[in-house]
């Protein structure tokens, strides 16, 4: 299997609800590396509780890179952020650019609200596209606003938003309803990439190595965990999506 690229991961020490210190952060990265992940974007929360500044991300990322290298782990660690939907509206263009996913100012990881979808949901995503930004919508399968109606993803996708589903959702970590929704999103070809959203070893660890198994489709799993994230980071267009085939009904 190709090197997996994980574009949603809380790996920075002591910035949000991820690892509490450098040692725990290195353990998290080591675990991901053991499972075949070779590139990780560090995506700390930017929300009212954890308002991570880009300078903090850069400083903690430097510390982590140094510690990971000292531990002999060969892995690429990139900057990023997970922007809360409401917080995003209060940031200016320069602030948004500084939070670019993988260091790419044209790519933003936007958290799907854990509430009913705001009326501004589709228009906010469309406005980002108007500014030349590709929104990467994080784990919509966990949002009450999407659970009942995954078709709400279609219009944003048609305007250029890409959708990220959590590996843990596909595996049932967040309950059966989220799991069914995650599989339905993949089956309806509304998912572009799968990421870990890992926070802590032993809690929400990296499960990207199990995507092929849970989907029963290694070709699609490779597209979701390697080809798409690679193309997004490179700023190139996405390769053709392999057909989902007959996904096992849950
Ligand atoms: Fe996250």
Image: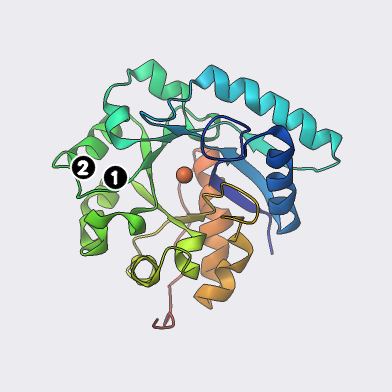
Count of numbered labels shown in the rendering: 2
- Up-down relation of residue 76 to residue 50 (above or below): below
Mark 1 Cα within 10 Å, few/some/many (few <14, many 20+)? many
**For this view, does 176 lie left or right of residue 207?**
left
Q: Secondary structure at mark 1?
A: loop
Earlier in the chain: of badge 1 and badge 2, it is 1
**For this view, does 66 lie left or right of residue 108?**
right
**Callout 1–callout 2 Cβ contact below 8 Å:** yes
Q: CA distance from mark 1 to mark 2?
A: 9 Å
Q: Going 43% across and 72% down the picture, which residue do you hit? A: 243
**Residue 194 place in picture, x, y as percent:** 49, 57
Q: Which residue is mark 1?
A: 113
**Residue 91 place in picture, x, y as percent:** 33, 21
Q: Is residue 154 visible?
A: no
Q: Is residue 143 visible?
A: yes
Q: Which residue is mark 2?
A: 121
């Amino acid at each position: 299997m190709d090197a997996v690229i994980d574009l949603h991961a809380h790996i920075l020490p002591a910035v949000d609800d991820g690892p509490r210190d450098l040692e725990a952060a290195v353990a998290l990265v080591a675990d991901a590396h053991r499972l075949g992940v070779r590139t990780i974007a560090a995506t700390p929360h930017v929300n009212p509780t954890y308002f991570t500044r880009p300078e903090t991300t850069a400083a903690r990322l430097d510390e982590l890179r140094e510690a990971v290298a000292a531990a002999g782990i060969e892995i690429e660690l990139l900057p990023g952020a997970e922007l809360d939907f409401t917080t995003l509206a209060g940031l200016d263009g320069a602030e948004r650019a500084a939070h670019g996913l993988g260091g790419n100012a044209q790519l933003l990881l936007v958290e799907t609200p854990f509430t009913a979808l705001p009326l501004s949901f589709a228009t906010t995503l469309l406005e980002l596209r108007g500014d030349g930004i590709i929104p990467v919508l994080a784990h919509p399968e966990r949002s009450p606003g999407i659970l009942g109606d995954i078709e709400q993803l279609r219009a944003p996708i048609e305007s250029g938003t890409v959708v990220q589903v959590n590996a843990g959702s596909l595996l049932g970590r967040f309950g059966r309803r989220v799991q069914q929704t995650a599989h339905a999103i993949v089956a309806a070809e509304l998912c572009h990439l799968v990421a870990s959203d890992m926070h802590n070893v032993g809690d929400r660890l990296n499960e990207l190595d199990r995507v092929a198994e849970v989907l029963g489709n290694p070709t699609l799993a490779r597209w979701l965990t390697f080809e798409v994230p690679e193309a997004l980071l490179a700023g190139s267009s996405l390769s053709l999506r392999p057909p989902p085939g007959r996904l096992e009904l849950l």
